[in-house]
Amino acid sequence: MKPTGVVLALSLALLGGCQSQPAQQAAAVVCDQACQAQQFNQLSQQFIDELWQIAPEWAVYQGKYEFAPMLSLPNEAERQATLAFVAKWRAQLQAVPKAQLPAATQTDQTLLLNLVDSFEWEIRRFKSWQWNPSQYNVGGVFGRVLSEQWGSEEQVLQAVLQRMQNVPQYYAIARTNLTNPTKEHTELGILQNQGSLQLFSPELLARAKASDLSFDDKANFEQRFLASRQAISSYIAHLEQRLQQMETTPGRSFRIGETLYEEKFALDIQAGMSAKQLYQRAVQDKDKAQQQMVKITEQLWSKYFSKPMPTDKLLAVRQLIDKLSAAHVERENFVSEVRQQIPELVQFVNQHDLLTLDPTKPLVVRETPAYMRGFAGASISAPGPYDNGGNTYYNVTPLDNMGAEEAESYLREYNHWVLQILNIHEAIPGHYAQLVYSNNESSSLVKSLFGNGAMVEGWAVYAERMMLEQGYGDFEPELWLMYWKWNLRVICNTILDYGIQVRGMTEEQGMDLLVNQAFQQQTEASQKWRRATLSQVQLTSYYSGFREIYDLREALKQQQGEDFQLKQFHQQFLSYGSAPVKEVRSLMMSN
């Protein structure tokens, strides 16, 4: 049978020939789709190998610890090197005829082109390197190098020794880069770098002195250790000074405006709609979620109250939520309670055959490291695809720095029912399970490395609904009420983010949305407002991804009828790594 697909001369120059034809047909070289996929995979591997050279920190997060000794400097030379990388690889990737690639490989091409576009946009358009002090922080990679089991003690300490060499220069460049920082990101930069100082502790210096490093290396280690501490402390002092100056001369606004927001949304979310369209849909779904909560409140009211239900239905919902929220764990047991719930979720997923979980991939619940605090109360830190044996950390921030009133508000938000939903989202079968699949089952390294945030967050939100639909919690109406409260929070994330960044929403309006319309506790609402001032677009990823995944499942149910199997859908969906949902939809609907 004659292979189909002709790769033109330009593509051959980039990819290399696949199968020669007789001499009289030398002008054309035939390569079927399998051949083309193989050649594109070689091209994408070259892309990845070159990327790590200009982004060694990213490489470490993905498990490439040979880059652990390298600390890149955030200077103009680095930005120009990135732009040169963008120009080279955009030309090479665009030269490959998309229509002649297999569908799954077309997705890889889309992801890589989106990535280079994002690099250029960040440098030329967004320019956060000029106004976001919190992006200058060496703690993350140092923390990873020191906490993971990837080499001998001497290799780890040698990597730290070499990385520390450029820390003073790194922070000196950071100070010159910052031309007009925002107040909010300056505050975050101070907080998180104070956390990074804790990594450079007396214990680390003692560890180096007790090691098998040479006498000279130990001397250099101490010198660079002290210089690193001084550089971080000096940067913190510099930010504190700039923060003080903002009392008389305000810094840049944290709001980025509609044009930049739509551009960032298109690059980050890669949804089948604009940011404005998603916002409008979220407003509609907010009303639907509130209606569901009213129905459950009417069902439960007499169980918890002897008085008549208020005629103001949303007020009644608020009163019932307040009543139920009193059932929560003690503050000192918050982290341990999260840890205890994980085996129960594993058992439910296995008993109901919802997804195959790999018991050899560890999930470790830990207190959030200090250098990561100040942004989210719970998060997942997963190993990269090069480090499949590494731990996945479920970071849970303890409440020991909160006052009694603030802690009580937080615990009421994460009450007995909501805490279970949080654990589904962050752990099983949410982020933890999806990222394990992405690292181990993905059809390509590209899909694992360059995942789409809306797919990642959307899966975790989808997992919440799916678990309750399958009977987790025995269809308890109290749990469903709290689920709809949690889902309303996801919807309002989009409304809040777009409202703040594009529509000029004030803090008073934002708190009204979160507290009075989405029934959140004051502490949670305040933290969400802060988070929305520190990030842009990311808060829309939860609702955007969930909506697309849920709609895809329902479309496949209708298409396949009685042949539809939930577990098969989950495992096929997750096999595409962390590709954008619209790309996964195209692949799954065409099969």
Image: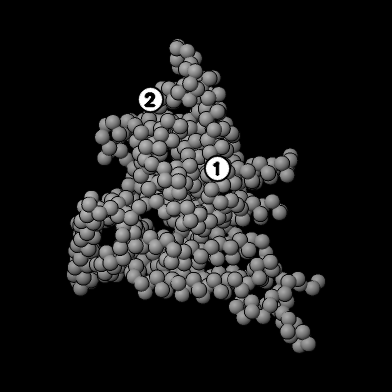
Q: Is residue 589 above or below residue 114?
A: above
Q: Which residue position holds label 1?
A: 280
Disc 1 and disc 2: Cα gap in Å? 34 Å
Query: Where residue 106 is drawn, which disc sits there?
Result: none
Q: In this rendering, does residue 158 appear at all?
A: no
- Quadrant location of residue 334? top left
Q: Which of the pair 109/358 is nearer the observer?
A: 109
Tell me residue 336's x, y (percent): 36, 37
Tell me residue 234's x, y (percent): 20, 61
Amino acid type, mark 2: Ala
Q: Residue furthest right?
A: 1
Mark 1 residue element: helix
Q: In this rendering, does residue 417 appear at all?
A: yes
Colouring rule applied to residues: one colour
Amino acid type, mark 1: Gln
Horizontal side, residue 64 vs residue 274: left or right: left
Crowding at dot 1, Cα within 10 Å, few <14 / some 14-19 / many 20+, comes out as: few
Tell me residue 395's x, y (percent): 38, 46
Q: Is residue 346 above or below residue 318?
A: below
Q: Residue at x 59, y 71 (%)?
A: 94
Q: Is residue 474 above or below residue 556?
A: above
Q: Earlier in the sequence, mark 1 or mark 2?
A: 1
Query: Where residue 326 is drawn, which disc sits there?
Result: 2
Horizontal side, residue 40 vs residue 213: left or right: right
Q: Residue at x 68, y 45 (%)?
A: 556
